[in-house]
Structures are given as C-alpha cells and as structure tokens.
Amino acid sequence: MSNTYIEPRINRDFSGILTAFVDFLKAESKSLFSVFITYNFVLIILLFLTNYIVDAGISSIVAISTGNLDGYLLENAQQNNAVTLIGTLATYVLTALIYILNSSLAGSYMKLYEEQGGTPEKKLVFKRALGKMLGSFVILFLGAICVIPVAIVGVIMIFIPILGLFAFAGLIITYFTWIGLSVFCYAYTDEISMTDAMGRGWQLLFFKFWKAFFTSFVALVVLYILSILFQILPAMLIGFYSMNSNLDNIELQNDFFIEALSFLFYGLNSISGILVTFISMFIFGFIYLNLHESKYNVYLKTRVERLDELSV
C-alpha cells in the first residue's frame, strides 16, 4: 500500500469527508490529471467547437482563421442559424457523453485505487470504465425521466414566497446528489444492476441525508466558484479592452482581438466544465463510500477479521 494512500471507506463526519477528499486530490493530482486529459481530450475539443459555434456561428471561425471578420459575419446569417441548431443538439449529446464517461472513470479509478492500495494504471481504469458506460447511460436516461416530477414539484415550490426558492434549491441539490451517488455506485460496484444502483443511491442518501446534502453542496459550490475564477481572465481582458478602445459597439463585435479572446474564453470554459464534472464524481464517490461504511461497516469488519487472524 502506498504511503500517500487515503482510505475512502472510513466513517467520517462532514468535515472529515471534505478533508479526506482534498488530501486524495493532492496525493493523486498527477494521475487524475493524466486520466482526465488522456480520455477527455477529444471531448474537450468537440465541446469547445460546439459551444463556440452555438454562440458565434461557424462563419466566425472562418473569419478568425482568415482575419476577415466584416464579410463573413454579415453574409451567412441563415446558414449560421442552422449550424447553431445542430451545434445546440450536439452540445446536449456531448454533455451526456461527458457525464457518462467521467462517472465511469471515477468509479473505476476509486475501485482500482482501493484494491491496489494506491494509484492505478490509467489503461486499466479506462478498460474497466468501458464496461460501465452503457449502464451509466441507462441510469442517466432514467434520471432524466425523473426530472419531470422534480420539475413539477419545483415549479409549485417557486410560488411559495421566499421559502419556496430555498426549498427548490434544496430539491435540485438532492436530486443531483442522488443521481451522482447512483451512477458512482454502478461504476464502482463490480456486479450490480442499474436499478439496484439507483435504489442503493436513494437508500444511502436518506440514511444520513444532511451529511450527504451539505457535503455535496459545499464541495460543488467551491468547485464551481473555482471554475468561474478560472474563466474570468478572458472576460476581464475583454472588458478592459472595450472600455479603453475607441471603437464603437459594432466595430467591437467585429474586432479580431475580441473574437480571439472569446475563442480563449470558450476553450477555458470547455476545459473547466468537463474538469468540474470529472472531479465532482470523486466527491460523490467519497460521499457514497462514507455512507456505505456508516450503514454496513464493511471496511471495519474486514479490519477486525484481519486483526483476529494476526492474533491467532
């Protein structure tokens, strides 16, 4: 077992889960980044292109590559609308694929990390993740169906003054925590059906609800804040350039430097968005393993049995 191994199956309190998760990220940062880049690189490029096309249209990409912004941006409005529609649909498909891939990678990584007592080989992680992707898709599909009653209840909550907004936010966090626990459970557990994974995720969520809820809430909020900070530099540069430029609004929209910064922004947005998804699945992993140990004491029983064997 590695000296930097962080045992995820110990029954910890709220702060203990977050501390163990941060320690895990520190110890496994190089390996996790390698897995993330290796198997998400193509998706990052595709998401970057689709996001940019949805917002600016394909003619903007042509304009940047040629340096001729004025002509292309004014001539192909109808073509851009069709491409934008296709890009929007492609974005939804890519988002689902990103979630499926990264949840499978996270569950497989944690399983091999636990079995080997340290950093697993990324090829083994990916090989195991491939066998879990179809089931993860089914869970995501069933979860999408469950969004309908959640949305109906959420709309009703919104009409309740003040408290309704907080209740709606709590409902959304609860829903995503349940889906995250379910997908991780399926990707982590060797032999389990999709429906059983969703059922186990539901049981563990409400076994110690407030621990799961607040751990998920705090960790995800911190992640998304860091993601926003990561993206804010291009936005600040655009604002600074616009305030100190002699160009009017129309000229600024067609300015090559502004378009290039926008290109950079979409690139950082794509990387940070997928990275947040990747890391968030490990958060759900630590929550799941903690709740599972709290309820079943599997790891504790195993340690006691080993001690008994050594004492004989």
Image: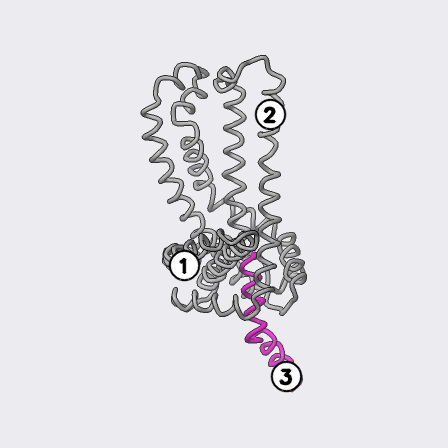
Amino acid type, label 1? Lys
Is 220 in front, or is 169? 169
Q: Which mark is residue 63?
A: none
Which residue of the protein is positioned furthest toward the bottom in this rendering? 312
Q: Is residue 45 visible?
A: yes
Indicate the quadrant containing the N terminus: top left, top right, bottom left or bottom right: bottom right
Q: CA distance from mark 2 to mark 1?
A: 44 Å
Quadrant of the rendered structure where residue 198 is?
bottom left
Mark 2 packing: few (<14 Cα in 10 Å), some, or many (20+)? Answer: few
Q: Main secondary structure of the magenta part?
A: helix
User: In what element is the residue under mark 2?
Assistant: helix
| Bounds of the magenta segment | 283-312
- Place of residue 88 in the rendered image (x, y in percent of width and height, measured from the top left): 38, 37
Amino acid type, label 2? Gly
Q: CA distance from mark 1 to mark 3?
A: 36 Å
Residue 232, relative to residue 162: is it above or below?
above
Residue at point 46%, 59% (across, down): 179
Q: Name the front one of labels 3 and 2.
A: 2
Q: Which mark is residue 308?
A: 3
Residue 125, relative to residue 78: is it above or below?
below
Label 3 close to label 2 by CB (< 8 Å): no
Amino acid type, label 3? Asp
Q: Is residue 292 left or right of residue 72?
A: right
